[in-house]
């Protein structure tokens, strides 16, 4: 795999996180789609609302205990920031395991929890949702896997569909709507490819085709000439990559221009954060490339407040825990006894969160407001700011 490559240097993997949250001021109804109804337990909004936080501590996997602690820290920071609503946070360790997550979710509900925040991993989140579905308790998982969304399970993580839709729509408006997709032959990147294809169909852009490569050094090198020839023959004016900087993207950015597919004549677009890690900004092949990112001002706010309270830098997923708790608190304050029903959670106007606006959809997925950025002269330049409300520019 690419971990063995030395040229260019393997770039560290990071995700993005986020800043503060509030209900967006609007009176529109809950979003349409997915399972209907207004399921969810009634609560006593005059008392502290029991909320279960399921974290992956105890898994023995590298980093899971640190992730668990930073998720709890971020959730408690959100509780401290609430104005009015009271949250009784109860933390349960899942060991990153689906069966354990199901048992812990059921134990949490048996102990009075009215909503579940977490778990992290898709299989664990799905199992937790199934375990408490008959009680009508909703699960706000940290996963970004749309396959587990639906019913009583909502995913808080940024989805490929949301990112692809934002980027494809922007590309079409800029006259770069004839899009060729390049992806590795892996489950994740094929899901990314499908999300891009769906966004192209929905936006009225043109699908110029796609090319794939085996996810290995030898496979990528062998595929480069074919990728270049197919992209050129397609007449595409934009190439959309599903790979990220902790995988094949640094090598694609180097090898494709060397083989004649230049970012100066064809717009490069990344489904992942092309600016992470920071060293990626110096790659010649990424100069001019577009990608999406949340509101950096809000993220920096959250990061600074976390550091002031706990020291150090929060895990990139910590913003999701803050968002989940703070959204729950805001709903409790506004919606009273119906705060944790499906209707309240999927309110169409959404929330102003730590990385910008977001809302939960009726199908269990989410929609987030993202900015469009470009790498220019080794710096990140925002071309189109993140929208501040749903229904306007950027959606």
Image (cartoon, helix red, strand yellow):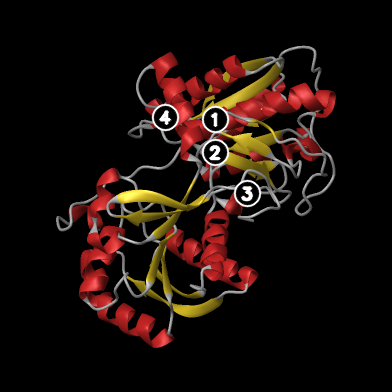
Residue position marked by numbered label 2 in the rendering: 142
- Disc number lying in front (4 or 3): 3
First-in-chain label (1 vs 2): 2
Q: How many marks?
A: 4
> Which numbered circle lies on residue 67?
4
- Specify the farthest residue to the left: 6
- Disc number lying in front (1 or 3): 3
Q: Residue at x 55, y 23 (%)?
A: 75
Distance in Å between CA atoms under marks 1 and 2? 8 Å
> Which numbered circle lies on residue 321?
1
Q: Residue at x 51, y 33 (%)?
A: 298
Q: Is residue 5 left or right of residue 371?
A: left
Categorize mark 3 by other alpha carbons within 10 Å: few (<14), some (14-19), many (20+).
many
Q: Are marks 1 and 2 in contact (CB under 8 Å)?
A: yes
Q: Position of residue 315 (x, y in %)?
A: 41, 31
- Disc number lying in front (2 or 3): 3
Categorize mark 4 by other alpha carbons within 10 Å: few (<14), some (14-19), many (20+).
many
């Amino acid at each position: 795999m690419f971990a063995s490559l030395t040229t260019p240097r393997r770039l560290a993997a990071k995700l993005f996180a986020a800043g503060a949250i509030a209900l967006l001021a609007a009176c529109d109804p809950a979003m349409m789609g997915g399972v209907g109804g207004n399921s969810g337990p009634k609560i006593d909004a005059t008392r502290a609302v029991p909320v279960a936080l399921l974290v992956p501590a105890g898994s023995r996997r590298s980093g899971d205990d640190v992730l668990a602690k930073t998720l709890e820290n971020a959730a408690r920071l959100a509780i401290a920031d609430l104005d009015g609503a009271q949250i009784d946070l109860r933390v349960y360790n899942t060991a990153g395991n689906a069966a354990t997550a199901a048992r812990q979710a059921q134990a949490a509900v048996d102990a009075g929890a009215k909503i579940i925040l977490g778990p992290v991993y898709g299989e664990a989140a799905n199992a937790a949702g199934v375990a408490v579905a008959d009680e009508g308790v909703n699960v706000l998982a940290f996963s970004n896997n749309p396959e587990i969304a639906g019913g009583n399970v909502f995913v808080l993580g940024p989805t490929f569909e949301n990112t692809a839709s934002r980027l494809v729509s922007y590309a079409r408006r800029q006259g770069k709507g004839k899009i060729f997709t390049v992806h590795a032959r892996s489950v994740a990147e094929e899901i990314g490819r499908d999300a891009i294809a769906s966004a192209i169909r929905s936006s009225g852009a043109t699908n110029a085709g796609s090319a794939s490569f085996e996810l290995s050094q030898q496979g990528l090198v062998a595929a480069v000439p074919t990728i270049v020839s197919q992209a050129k023959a397609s007449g595409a004016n934009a190439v959309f990559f599903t790979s990220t900087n902790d995988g094949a993207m640094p090598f694609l950015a180097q090898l494709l221009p060397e083989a004649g597919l230049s970012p100066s004549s064809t717009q490069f677009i990344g489904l992942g954060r092309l600016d992470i890690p920071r060293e990626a900004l110096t790659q010649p092949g990424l100069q001019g490339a577009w990608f999406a990112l949340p509101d950096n001002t809000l993220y920096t706010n959250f990061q600074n407040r976390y550091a002031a309270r706990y020291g150090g830098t929060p895990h990139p997923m910590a913003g999701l825990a803050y968002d989940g708790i703070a959204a729950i608190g805001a709903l409790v304050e506004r919606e009273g006894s119906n705060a944790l029903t499906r209707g309240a959670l999927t309110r169409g106007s959404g929330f102003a969160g730590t990385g910008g606006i977001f809302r939960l959809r009726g199908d269990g997925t989410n929609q987030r407001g993202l900015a469009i950025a470009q790498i220019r002269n080794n710096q990140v330049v925002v071309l189109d700011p993140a929208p501040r409300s749903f229904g306007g520019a950027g959606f």
